[in-house]
């Protein structure tokens, strides 16, 4: 069967119940995919314990799911053109539900990874079609509401996953890391079934070149291999590992093959020239920056609370909730601002507030607890809401300004491109932060170790104090001295890790400043939201 042309669909002008159901369905799909990925990450320790897996073995659990989502991102463009978005979403949602139900029932690592690949391939189709469907189904005056809900979807779900996983582990079981999606996806299926109208299989006009699946396969497989290299790089010591080197070289070669093939045999579903626009490239950099700054709440704070303060996931959840919960109110506030203010100004305010929050967190000490993050989290919550809503708002204005909604190839290209950027940006940022924390911890540990030596006044006083406290509970002076030395070494490691986390917050704040420079080069889009959301528009 020859992949077809998709007929242009003009944006809706009136609001009806059926498009609203479809919009709710695709937004729910994006939330399910985000939630699944985050739950696998924060719940990995529980999965490892339940299945008796080692750290190296279990590391492939996250990688298999997320790399599969990366693979299907570009390839879903081809599938959407072949079957239509409604069929792709319904088929994939049904498969994802079945896989999620049986996933925790398999205790073999091989079977688990195979099923997670299937889950990633199906859940990965939920993202690319979300924003484009929202734009083409909602009237323009309601599009800001769709943007706000999409933003809440991503930011709220990302920060709430810690609390959800903690609740599952404490009150239910680790199985709910997977069954959570199995419960929500049937609702998504119902919403899409009734909310997205049936359409006949698209047909290709006579003489029109047929889209090729080979180029998509090269690009998808290459992107997936590069993603695996990023995800496993820190564990395998990057390019000192033959596996990472071969993954990187092969992935880059396949992506290059896809680009060369497109130049020689242009694919009607892809328009690279559309991606070469100035604002599109700059907004992709902004998206990468946003994915990086989110690591302040996704990586830095949980790592500190768990490694230094010994918090359990159940105790870490409430700390992050105060970033997640305000997103509902803040999203509506950001939507109201977008009606009146240029998104670039709101982007500037959002990233500035995140930078301020990170500078406050950079004063972290080893005695900080959840309450110490309170004021910075207020700035962080407001900043993330403003930054993400205005970023998506700017992307939407760029789509509208180019007239891409009337050109299916541009819409599909745009959706696939930003899906790849979103996943790569998040993984590259996580890899960078993981490597940065390890390097800085080693540096601070060496620096502190120079001042903690036997014979030093402060070190001897600390050692004698621990020795005196432990003597009544030890078998002899030698045992007490050994335990005291272990405590001193533990304190050095805690201080070194705390200083590394402080450096991480400084790094994130610097990335916010660099992002502000990128925002400064964004060109103003002629059409603003105050025009397209006005009554009667």
Image (cartoon, helix red, strand yellow):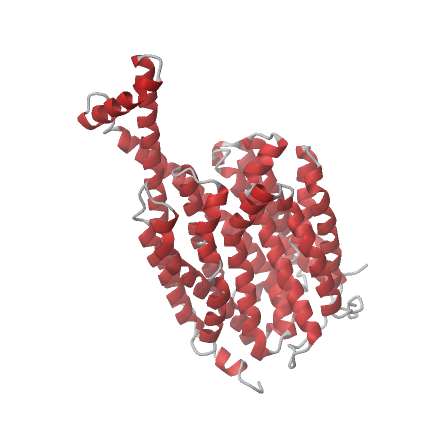
Residue 123 pos. (x, y %): 66, 53
Give the image quarter of residue 200: bottom right
Q: Residue at x 32, y 12 (%)?
A: 476
**Residue 222 higher or lower than 142, as above or below:** above
Closer to the camera in the image, 270 or 51: 51
**Residue 432 higher or lower than 342, as above or below:** above
- Looking at the image, how many numbered discs can be counted on the residues? 0
Q: Residue at x 37, y 54 (%)?
A: 374
In the orientation shown, which residue stands out farthest toward the front? 472
Image quarter where the N terminus lies is: bottom right
Residue 218 seen from this side = no
Q: Is residue 35 left or right of residue 324?
A: right
**Residue 208 higher or lower than 533, as above or below:** above
Residue 181 pos. (x, y %): 66, 51
Q: Residue at x 66, y 39 (%)?
A: 113
Closer to the camera in the image, 472 or 157: 472
Q: Is residue 186 left or right of residue 433?
A: right
Residue 176 pos. (x, y %): 64, 45
Image quarter where the C terminus lies is: bottom right
**Residue 409 higher or lower than 96, as above or below:** below
In the orientation shown, which residue stands out farthest toward the left? 457
Q: Is residue 275 left or right of residue 213?
A: left
Residue 296 pos. (x, y %): 42, 51
Residue 326 seen from this side = yes
Give the image quarter of residue 449: top left
Q: Residue at x 62, y 53 (%)?
A: 33
């Amino acid at each position: 069967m020859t992949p077809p042309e998709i007929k242009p669909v003009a944006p809706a002008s009136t609001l009806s119940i059926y498009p609203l159901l479809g919009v709710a369905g695709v937004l729910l799909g994006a939330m399910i995919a985000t939630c699944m990925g985050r739950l696998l990450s924060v719940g990995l320790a529980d999965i490892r314990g339940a299945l008796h897996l080692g750290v190296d073995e279990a590391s492939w659990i996250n990688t298999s799911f997320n790399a599969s989502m990366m693979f299907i991102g570009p390839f879903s463009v081809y599938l959407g053109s072949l079957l239509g978005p409604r069929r792709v979403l319904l088929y994939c949602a049904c498969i994802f539900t079945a896989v999620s139900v049986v996933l925790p029932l398999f205790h073999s690592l091989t079977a688990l990874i195979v099923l997670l690949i299937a889950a990633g391939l199906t859940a990965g189709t939920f993202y690319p079609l979300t924003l484009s469907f929202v734009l083409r189904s909602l009237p323009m005056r309601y599009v800001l509401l769709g943007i706000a809900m999409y933003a809440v979807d991503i930011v709220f779900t990302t920060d709430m996953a810690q609390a959800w996983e903690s609740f599952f582990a404490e009150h239910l079981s680790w199985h709910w890391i997977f069954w959570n999606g199995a419960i929500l996806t049937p609702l998504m299926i119902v919403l899409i079934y009734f909310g997205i109208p049936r359409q006949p299989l698209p047909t290709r006009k006579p003489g029109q070149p047929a889209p090729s699946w080979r180029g998509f396969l090269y690009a998808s497989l290459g992107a997936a291999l590069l993603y695996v290299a990023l995800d496993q790089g820190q564990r395998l010591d990057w390019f000192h590992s033959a596996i990472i080197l071969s993954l990187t070289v092969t992935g880059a070669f396949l992506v290059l093959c896809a680009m060369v093939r497109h130049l020689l045999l242009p694919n009607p579903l892809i328009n690279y020239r559309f991606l070469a626009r100035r604002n599109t490239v700059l907004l992709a950099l902004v998206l990468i920056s946003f994915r990086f700054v989110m690591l302040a709440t996704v990586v830095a704070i949980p790592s500190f609370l768990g490694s230094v303060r010994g918090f359990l996931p159940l105790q870490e959840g409430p700390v992050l909730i105060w970033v997640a919960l305000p997103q509902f109110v803040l999203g509506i506030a950001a939507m109201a601002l977008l009606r009146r203010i240029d998104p670039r100004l709101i982007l500037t305010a959002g990233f500035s507030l995140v930078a301020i929050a990170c500078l406050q967190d950079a004063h972290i000490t080893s005695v900080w607890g959840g309450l110490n993050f309170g004021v910075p989290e207020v700035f962080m919550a407001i900043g993330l809401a403003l930054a993400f809503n205005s970023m998506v708002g700017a992307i939407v204005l760029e789509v509208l300004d180019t007239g891409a909604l009337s050109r299916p190839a541009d819409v599909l290209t745009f959706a696939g491109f930003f899906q790849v950027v979103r996943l790569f940006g998040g993984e590259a940022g996580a890899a960078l932060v993981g490597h940065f924390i390890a390097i800085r911890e080693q540096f601070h540990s060496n620096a502190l170790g120079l001042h903690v030596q036997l014979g030093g006044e402060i070190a001897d006083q600390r050692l004698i104090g621990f020795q005196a406290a432990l003597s009544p509970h030890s078998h002899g002076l030698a045992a007490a001295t050994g335990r005291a030395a272990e405590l001193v070494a533990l304190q050095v490691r805690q201080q070194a890790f705390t200083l590394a986390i402080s450096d991480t917050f400084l790094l994130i704040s610097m990335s916010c400043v660099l992002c502000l420079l990128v925002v400064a080069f964004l060109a103003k889009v002629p059409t603003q939201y105050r025009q397209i959301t006005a009554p009667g528009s």
